[in-house]
Image: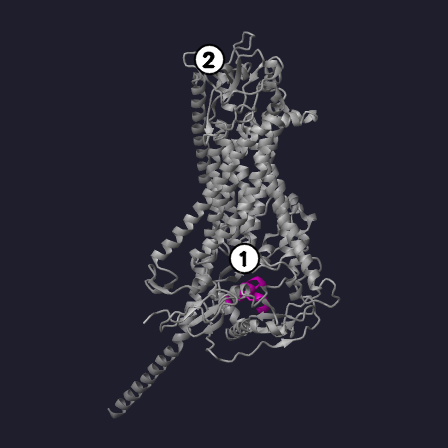
Amino acid sequence: MSDDENVLEMDSGPDSDPEAETELEGTEELVYAQEFLPTYQVIEEGEAVAPVVKVEFNGLTDSLFFNDGKRRIDFVLVYEDEDKKDFEKRHTFQRRKRRREYFEASLVKMGMELEAAASVVDEKVLFVKVHMPWDVLCTYAEVLHIKLPIQPNDLTSKSSPFNWFTKHFYPSQDLIKEEVDYFTAPFAKDRLEYFYIKDQDQFFTPAMRSRMAYYILSRAPYEVRRHVKKFGISKLLDGGVYKAAYPLHDCRFNVKSMDEDCPNERYLLYKEWAHPKSFYKMQPLDLIRNYYGEKIGIYFAWLGFYTGMLAFAAVVGLGCFIYGYKTQDTSTWSKEVCDPRIGGSIVMCPQCDRECTYWRLNSTCESSKKLCIFDNFGTLVFAVFMSIWVTLFLEFWKRYQAELEYEWDTVEFLEQEEQPRPEYEAKCVHERINPITKAKEMVPFTSCGKCIRLSFGIGTVLFWILLIVASVVGVIVYRLAVFFAFSAKLRQDLKELEPFREYVTPQMATSVTASIISFVIIMFLNYVYERVAIWITDFELPRTKTEYENSLTLKMFLFQFVNYYSSCFYIAFFKGKVVGFPGQPVYWLGKYRNEECDPGGCLIELTTQLTVIMGGKAIWNNIQEVLLPWMKNMIFRYCSSSGRSEKPIPRWEQDYQLQPVGKLGLFYEYLEMVIQFGFVTLFVASFPLAPLLALINNLFEIRVDAWKTTTQFRRVVPEKAQDIGAWQPILQGVAILAVVTNAMIIAFTSDMIPRLVYYWSFSVSDGEGNGMHTMAGYINNTLSIFDIEDFSEKSRPLNMPYWFHNGTTCRYRDFRHPPGHPKQYEFSVYYWHVIAAKLAFIIVVEHIVYLTKFVLAYVIPDVPVTVKEQIKREKYLTQVILHEASLHLVTKHMKPVADKILKHAAGQDETETDLDLDLDLHL
């Protein structure tokens, strides 16, 4: 018979027909492993379950306890009373009621204590308060390998010599006391006397209690029907059985609790962290970790560290920008473009077929000056600096992360400490032999099934990436089509707005509108793909939550990488690179003439694209993060009438009025920052102000995230996390790619290499007899000559300006031989010199930077020496405790046996003595 008769199953929907659901047949019952859920007890099918006791609200709005004032509330469940529904609809809710009552009975059987209270605002709503007794806490602290204090840390820490200055940028120590540092060890019930327990009620922090409560809630069954068991608070929430489930905030964010024993951590976080007036202060990371858990703490630690490192890059980038701005009027090539005798006498060829006409080079004077701001030797220095900066950022973050891992007890946070996801456990119907332990274990699919799921996921991701590429091609076609229209009509439409004619060129108008359209497409595809990526990851069924998040992270980043950066890569490395020459242009799809760069070069267009996407993304994210939660809370309070109620509202109901935390938690926050990190590093050679804009955005981002987390959202369920997960290798990959992209931008997108080649190989003497090279004549040297008689009928301009009726030639950007030359319109020697110089530049710069990165990564240790010493000390103490506990256990078990042996030996000695005496008397 089959091995999967009784199966733990996650419910597929809120109101599915029980007759239509599939049932697996067999004989062997599958239940939780005892080490995962030791208090699990089965409620037999048909067994009566008692409802939770309901009590009246006692009027204590700041209370975090049951009505008896002793049992702490560790979690809150919210539901609507089915008996108070409309009569004609009531029967549809009875199934939900049965599931809820069974679920609550399961919790009670597993050792948890419940108490229900009606809402003071809406009589239909009820709140179930959950409490974990001491014995249950100890049981699951051991199951979850929670590390707890064994003795105070006796290793002295070195204080910084700059404390006299930096103390002004830290939260007030009068409000947020410095925590006592302890050595810790994984909790074990049989070694309770070795742990540092001052107060039993305070030994487990509220964050630990909530984490353990959620562990049980996510695995407690809510329905048993024949051979199928269904379980998990997540599906009860999705199915509408419960409206919400959350741990409690300890007080209001802007008012201290009236309870003297309340730590008021939320109030302290708001006052010293989330309030706008604290923008200049360092983050209270230990308090954040204690209140929200390590996962939230490590995010804010990373964000703060990244923002601090951005300050150095922003200063250097701003210096490069100022240098470019100051030298734009003294640039030789910019002067030549703007000079009426040089730029004004150079007639440029049309940049599109028929509709475009001839134009003078000095019409691009302003864009040429703007280009000099970003395309100068300072940019080269800044690009190399940023490559080194990225390495330092990642290496120093590893060191800082190692310190946090030790301080927050996540150094030995191994995979076996993280329990499987309930969704994974629910599908475990196949048996296999564990390759490590050689024991039997249950898995959700065979090796072939896993391969099919992964292949399907990879195929779907590739399809969506190709969809993005198709959208980029669509934007390119838009550029080509609209450029013709702008070239024909834009100048005439702006003839009355004379000041704007110098700035609004056809190329600039095309670039800006295409950037806006590209941004809209990016945001739309993001919205759709997020849901597709979540569905694919759910289908793959990763084992642990960390594996789930890493899989989703990789899918989302691959998509976002192509989505956000594809247009930038096109402008930087493809636009204007294969255009042919005026007599023989290259066409897309045989119809659209390939797009040329702005007369000032593609670099200024890349800068425009980065500015639009970075700026638009920052504005959109702030709207989503600030306005939407605030407006939702306002609407909820208005609709529920709680805002107009004069009744005292209990703590649990105040939290219910806040926004729920999303299922993916910090995923979108990380994604936003990593995408920004890509903009800051990958294309920084074209936009030195990117680090400064990112720094300003992040200073707001930290406080905005802190504000919304503290004031607008319910308290998140605390989670353990050792590091930033899959984002770390993604950052390293971006850092490696940034070296290549910046080197290629300088080589192929900017004009720096052609200038250097001209300066050292083709420039003329300065005329003063000292043999010095000069940039004079550079513009004329970079423009090739074209005979207008060689235009094809397809590309010959329809209109000709009045000042060009006697012209015979025009100029275009390229290095080709002039008409009449034996190799007319073929590439000249100058072109091959420039190509060789560009390739040599890329190879040399890459090798130098990569060598520097390798040396820095080798020299800077990932873990500080002091942290290594503390880790060794803690391991030693843990081993001593384990040894003493083992000796104590052996002594405890062997003492009765030893006493019996000694007693028996003593009896034998007495017998032998008596025999000796009798023998002596007899003799």
Specify which label sits upstream in the sequence, 1 or 2. Answer: 1
Q: Main secondary structure of the magenta part?
A: helix
Q: Residue 75 at what x, y percent from top left?
A: 58, 66
Q: Is the residue 650 above or below the residue 854 in the image?
A: below
Q: Is the residue 456 above or below the residue 210 in the image?
A: above
Q: Quadrant of the image for the C terminus?
A: bottom left
Q: Residue 48 at what x, y percent from top left?
A: 51, 80
Q: Is 454 left or right of 498, judged from the image as shown?
A: left
Structural distance between the alpha carbons of marks 1 and 2: 67 Å
Q: Is the residue 468 above or below the residue 834 in the image?
A: below
Give residue 759's mark: none
Q: Residue 893 at what x, y percent from top left?
A: 40, 75
User: Splitting the image into 4 quarters, where does residue 633 fall?
Assistant: bottom right
Q: Residue 462 at what x, y percent from top left?
A: 43, 45
Q: Nearer the viewer, residue 101 or 288?
A: 101
Residue with the mark numbered 2? 819
Q: Which residues are magenta?
A: 194-216
Q: Nearer the viewer, residue 118 or 341?
A: 341
Q: Secondary structure at mark 2?
A: loop
Is 198 part of what is drawn in magenta? Answer: yes
Q: Are marks 1 and 2 in contact (CB under 8 Å)?
A: no
Q: Secondary structure at mark 1?
A: loop
Q: Nearer the viewer, residue 848 or 482?
A: 482
Residue with the mark numbered 1? 663
Q: Residue furthest bottom?
A: 922
